[in-house]
Each structure stands twice: as structure tokens, then as C-alpha cells.
Amino acid sequence: MPLTCQTLIDRHSQLWHQATHHPFLEQCKTGAIAQSQFNTWLVQDYLFVLEFTRMAARLVTLAPVADMDGLLGGLGALKDELEWFQAKAAQRHLSLAAEPQPTCETYCIVMKQLAGAPYAIQAVAFWAIELAYNQGWQLPGPMVEPYDEFANRWGNPGFTAYVKLLEQQADAALEALPESDWAKAEAIFVKVAELEIEFWQLAFNA
Ligand code: HMH
């Protein structure tokens, strides 16, 4: 049995469900989320995306030619995303010169520590991180204003297709990963899921 992204989801379906379903998202759907909760998420996620962008760049340095186009498209989307976060923060009069909270900081450290890991391991982490937001923002269904814009950023069909491509690329890389490293791929998937849950909780606690 080869190791695939789908195997990882199947083996950890309950954990993955928790990573992609959270009262924070449910309350964005209805509009019940408090400004302090949403704004905390916005600022902390900007700090997360800065570090995620560095991770994306590292992935490009390892990628086979076949994966280059998709990853460069992803970096282009991250350029837009960082500008978009800056615009959203400005509209809400939020400073982005904030300190990362412990969960955000831990997540950033986990991403940094992936430097030097085999491409397959980094590709699995990259896919899982994007899938978490794709599903998390999409599964609740249509959200009320102003949260619909946020739901659409990660839930739109183009983003879903991008995440599918990342899955195919990660699967192809996993095929070439020695079986002795499979546990590492599984461990990073579990770590991403756990950190996603903690990240929603960080915002929800604000
Ligand atoms: C915490 N996970 C977190 N933030 C994000 N922006 C994504 C995943 C997807 O990019």
C-alpha cells in the first residue's frame, strides 16, 4: 500500500475533522463572531502567512520541474494575499506590527524546521496547510458579510483546484520517498492538524 495524502486523511479523519470545523468558522458564517476574535485571527494569520511564504519559497528550491509552475502560481497568490491582509488590516485600523502569540509562533517554528526535510515531507505539509483552509472556510457554506470575502478567498473553486494539484504533487513525491521516512510524513500531517485546531482556538479565545 503506497502512502498518499488521502491515506493520511483517512488514518486521522477525526483529527482532520476537528482541524477543519471550528466554532470560529461557524460564527463567521452567522456573523456572531466578535470583532476582537476576528481581528485577532486576522493579525495572527498575517504573521503566519509571512512565514508560510518563506516555506513556499523553500519548496520551489527543491521542486522537480513538473511542480515548478504550480508552486510559482502559489507564490504569486501569496503576494496578493499578503497585500490583501494589509488592506483588510488597514480597513479595520489594526496594526500588523504585532507579536505572534505562542500558537502562531510554534506553527512558524514548525514550518522553519521543515527546511532541510525531503521534498515529499515539505510537500505534504504545504498541501495539508492549504487544504485545512480550503475545507475550513468552505464547509460551513455561504457566510454573511463581511466574512463571505474571507470564505471565498480560500473556499473558491480555483483554490480548491490548486489544493488538488498540491495533493497530486505531494503524492508523486511520496511515491519516491523511502518507506523509512513515511512516519515523518505522517507526523507532519498530524502536527499541521493539531496546530490548525490550536490556531482557531487562539482566535476564538480572544
Ligand atoms: C493557520 N493555516 C493557517 N493560516 C492560513 N492562512 C492557512 C493555513 C492557509 O494558507
Image (cartoon, rainbow, N blue to C red):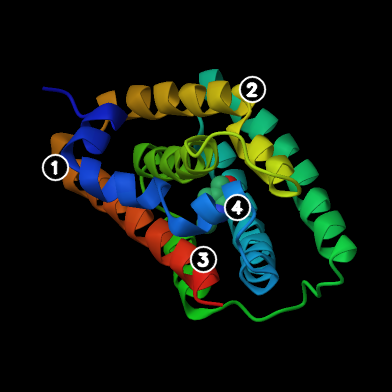
Tell me what residue is drawn at x 51 percent, y 69 percent: 204
Q: Earlier in the sequence, mark 1 or mark 3?
A: 3
The answer to whether the residue labelled 1 contacts the one labelled 4, judged by CB atoms less than 8 Å apart, is: no
The residue mark sitting in front, 4 or 2, is 4
Residue 143 on image: x %, y %: 63, 41
Q: Amino acid at mark 4?
A: Cys
Q: Earlier in the sequence, mark 4 or mark 2?
A: 4
Q: Earlier in the sequence, mark 1 or mark 4?
A: 4
Residue 99 on image: x %, y %: 65, 81
Tell me what residue is drawn at x 61 percent, y 34 percent: 142
User: Mark 3 sits on what residue?
Assistant: 108
Q: Earlier in the sequence, mark 4 or mark 3?
A: 4
User: Mark 1 sits on what residue?
Assistant: 180
- Disc 1 from disc 4: Cα separation: 42 Å
The furthest residue to the left: 1
- Quarter where residue 96 is shown: bottom right
Residue 106 on image: x %, y %: 44, 72
The residue mark sitting in front, 1 or 4, is 4
Q: Image check: 122 left or right of 74?
A: left
- Disc 2 from disc 3: Cα separation: 26 Å
The answer to whether the residue labelled 1 contacts the one labelled 3, judged by CB atoms less than 8 Å apart, is: no
User: Mark 4 sits on what residue?
Assistant: 28
User: Mark 2 sits on what residue?
Assistant: 158
Q: Nearer the viewer, residue 111 or 44?
A: 44
Q: Earlier in the sequence, mark 2 or mark 3?
A: 3
The residue mark sitting in front, 2 or 3, is 2
Tell me what residue is drawn at x 17 percent, y 47 percent: 183
Q: Nearer the viewer, residue 34 or 177?
A: 34
Could you tell me which secondary element the residue under label 3 belongs to?
helix
